Amino acid sequence: MAFEFAFTPEQRLLKRSARQFMRSQIEPGLPDDDWSGHGGDSPLELVKRMQHQGWFGIGIPRALGGAGMGEVEYCILMEEISAVDSSLGTIFGAHSGIGLMPIYLFGNDDQRERFVRPIAEGRHLAAFALTEPTAGSDAASIKTKAVRDGDDWLISGTKIWCSNGNFADTVVVFAVTDETLGAHGGVTAFIVSKGTPGFTVGTIEDKMGIRQSNTAELIFDNCRVPKQNVLGKVGEGFIAALTALDGGRVGLAAACLGACKRLLDDCVRRAKDRERYGKPLGKNQSIQWMLADMATDIHLAEYAVYHAATLTNEYYEKIAHGEPVPRALREKVSRAAAAVKIHCSEMTGRAGERAIQIFGGDGLKMKYRIDRSFRDQVITEIYEGTNEVQRLIIARELLQEGA
Amino acid sequence: MPPSGARLRVLVPVTGAFHGKVRLKRNGLVDTEGVERILSRESAQALALAKQLAAEGAELVVVHVDKGGGEEVLREALAHGADQGVLVEGAEKSESDASTRATTIAEVYKQMGPFDAVIGPARSEFAGFTGTLAALAGQLELPCLVGVSRVAVDGVGLRIAYQSLFGDYDLRVPRPSVLLVGDLEPSHPTAWGIHDAHRVKGILRVKADNYTVQKALTKRQRIENVPQESRSLESVDGATLVRRLRSRSLIAEKGGSP
Amino acid sequence: MSDDLGLAGLYATMADAPRPAANLEDVRGNDWRNILVLGRATKTGVYPETLALVSRARFLADELGCRVEVLLIGSSLDAATAELKRYPIDTVYRVAAPDYAPIDHTARILEQVVRKRKPELVLVFQSRTGDAVTAYAANRLGVGFATGASKVEMDTSERKAVVTHESGGQARFQVVSALQVLPQFVSVQRGLFRAPLETPDATVRVHDLSVEAGRLAPIEVLGHKPAPTPTLETADRVVVAGARIQSAAELDLARQLAQRLDAVFGVTVGIVERGLAKDEGNVVGVHDHHVAPRLLVTVGVRGALDFLEAIEGNPLVCAIGCEATDPIAKRAAYLVAGEVPAGVASVLKGL
């Protein structure tokens, strides 16, 4: 029996049309120079055009205004968007993967109607606020607090590294609601709308990479949120965060895959284009090996990413429909997500170094955008959980299995 | 004349294109195995034009004469926002040419009409579809305009923007007319459209035998590889170059327009 | 820019169209004979493509032993007629109409002329309108047609046209088909044939015909804007200056050449990086503009792959001011070797 692993006609069309749209409608609108100006000025006009394509609610059912697809299709879009620009990939991932998805998965019907529909219809953008100055990889140590005040909650604290934070209409905020219970039981997720009194945007980070994605500090000062905005049950916020981050990691891996494929295309063209010592660069075995290594990495990553996406899709469908999730499936998803996140982010790092070597001095010029890929890649080994933490997740699973 | 007050209806004949490398087999047949068949770029342009009328409430009916892989071509057209798809199946079994395709589409037009416009691609593989749609106009005795980039309802007619060497014109044309698209940014399917095209919208399947009422008037003799150009580089002086270019109609004769 | 032959221009002048001078006579008998070329007039003569078709028609007619006839449709055809009289044509038919009729109108004139004069082969040069006129007329006569032929031959025993179509895109194969019913309508790609030699003793008969094209669709002109300037991507003719150019004066010569050829002017990455030309949004290269002209003239271009890969379609490449060993020579059909100034000057002189 053959091992079937191929896109459906619908997925092929989505991939092809996303590629055409990104390369013909979005790429020409991106600046050649991403270095000038303040990192964090996102090209929102371009984002709006992408929203109108129905991509920003890709995994949300048609009945809620989404495109009625799933995690594989989300990864297809992540790949094609990031092949053109990693900043746009970050905006899309922060919105769809970790901003929107927990509201859809853990929200009640009222929340889905109030928050998911405008997002899925391409009218609103979402963000995810978990990290704090003293809680990065150690997300369980968050200090932002939420206390009850009648029918409302008052949130106080500061979140950092919030992608889309400056312009998101809807933010999922994680806060401690019971210090005695720790992460599991003591953290609750809240849906906070832009403009809510007590919610302000602080510093916008000026970064060396993904400069056109907006990375903001969010400040909550007795921000009053009605109890209707508690996402899921009180005390179950950490599960929502971890669940969203699993899918987010797979999406990030797909983004790395797209960026890496684009780098390989550029390098192949360069190897044919550039002549040295009377022959194209690609005639040199050293260059051929670099290209072959990149292609091998990509080949393996592609299967792994879409396998992880398929697992995540199964996992999310069960949650969305209120079905019990087998522990084995949850663990499989976490492990696969961690693995592809590590592999793909590090693969992109290797590809960036090789691309600079193949391009030589031109690789440092902004015109060829190799420098940008190189700078954009750095964060992929850090956000959505550092690669070191991902290795801990995998090791923990391995040792549990061994026991 | 369309019934007054009825929803405007537009027929959009679409063509497919190969997505990937097509080779010729030793037996003279085209090897398309594993090559995806997709909506042609020109058809996406035609849909972009037709969607201008859809924005005014028109119903878009896409029709595709299938020569293999046609369902995906038609579903892609539906993904662009067309309301209904008609797939003429089995055309690959009989010899066909632009005339027979025109007859087939004319039959679809008559049986599924009335329509207020036929909007189609102006080029396709082998540059055949312009001819097909003009032949359709000839059969249906409809006005035919090539190079249309904008269309809107204008009373009982249509107001179109038309591109030609003489410039861009705004014209009022009667309904129905056959409009072949000009240089226009192709439409892009949305994720919503892709979903609906594959999971919601149905396709009306008709047999080509019932629609093809005419024999092919051109007969395919063979398919062959394009011979490698044997032309060697010719070293010339300036005057010779100019003569060569004029003889190939690539530049103007003295005093003439190119 | 559209390669359309124009429709709307005629509506503005429809009212002033001169009356036809004579009625069209039927050819007696049932034989379909002769080759009819649908010509296209300019203000000063005919389009080069018309002459190229006359050349092919003459060749085929000599094989078949028949006549070459040209049909001109328009409002001001004297210059075109005068030019055609210098070439090996038997008869020119002229039908008075606005500059170039709309598809249905032109096609009906063509249909009527074909019904009366009974040519066995009708040749039209390809454009979107040319294809449409061919198909419309053929269909009204109930006969087949072929559009966009890359080759036209005649099976002289059967007197059937055998046409070849090259596939578009990446596929490199061609389909050969034969028309089955007379008269045969073929639109032919441009740039395939040479214009015929002028024939000093040519005796070309000219007939002005009266043709009833039937009722015109009620089309009204609401507005008009002049044609947009072609861009590097859309131009039929492109001249590109490259890094072998040594000075601003040489660069200016390349610009002059572009102007004389009515071509769009571009530069390579190489000459911009050398600082001789500025990037004015006209750099041709993989990361900049791609070009897909019918004619590409390079001036002082060596042919880096960045440039070569930005060339789409199958243009005729003429390389001026480079050497036969340069990469561009592998793509070029014609080479004017040597230094740029001498090469460009000799071409300018020839123009």
Image (cartoon, rainbow, N blue to C red):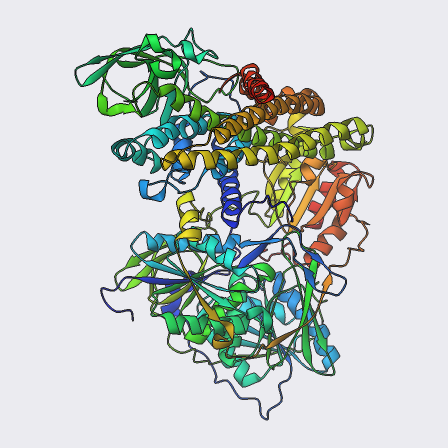
What residue sits 33% from the left and 22% below the top?
A171
Q: Residue furthest bottom?
A: C29
Q: Residue furthest left?
A: A150
**Who is closer to the viewer here, B50 or A192?**
A192
> Image quarter for residue B115?
bottom left
Quadrant of the image occupied by residue B96: bottom right
Q: Nearer the viewer, residue A211 or C38?
A: A211
Visible residue check, residue B18: yes
The vertical placement of B42 against A255, above or below, is below
Which residue is found at the position 46% from the left and 55% from the top?
A: B75
In terms of depth relative to the viewer, which is nearer, B85 or C61? B85
Whether residue B45 sits left or right of residue B248 in the image: it is: left
| Residue A285 as seen in the image, left or right of residue C206 | right
Q: Is residue C289 above or below residue C237?
A: above
Image location of residue B3, percent across then percent down: 25, 69
C229 vs C88: above or below: above
Give above or below for C180 relative to A18: below
Image mark count: 0
Quadrant of the rendered structure where residue C289 is? top right
Q: Residue at x 41, y 54 (%)?
A: B49
Residue B257 coordinates in the image, percent (x, y): 57, 56
Q: Tell me residue C223's x, y (percent).
A: 34, 54
Q: Could you tell whether A40 is left or right of C309 in the image?
A: left
Q: Can residue C87 be seen from the camera position used here?
A: no
Q: Residue at the front extreme?
A: A403
Q: Position of residue B107 (x, y in %)?
A: 43, 74
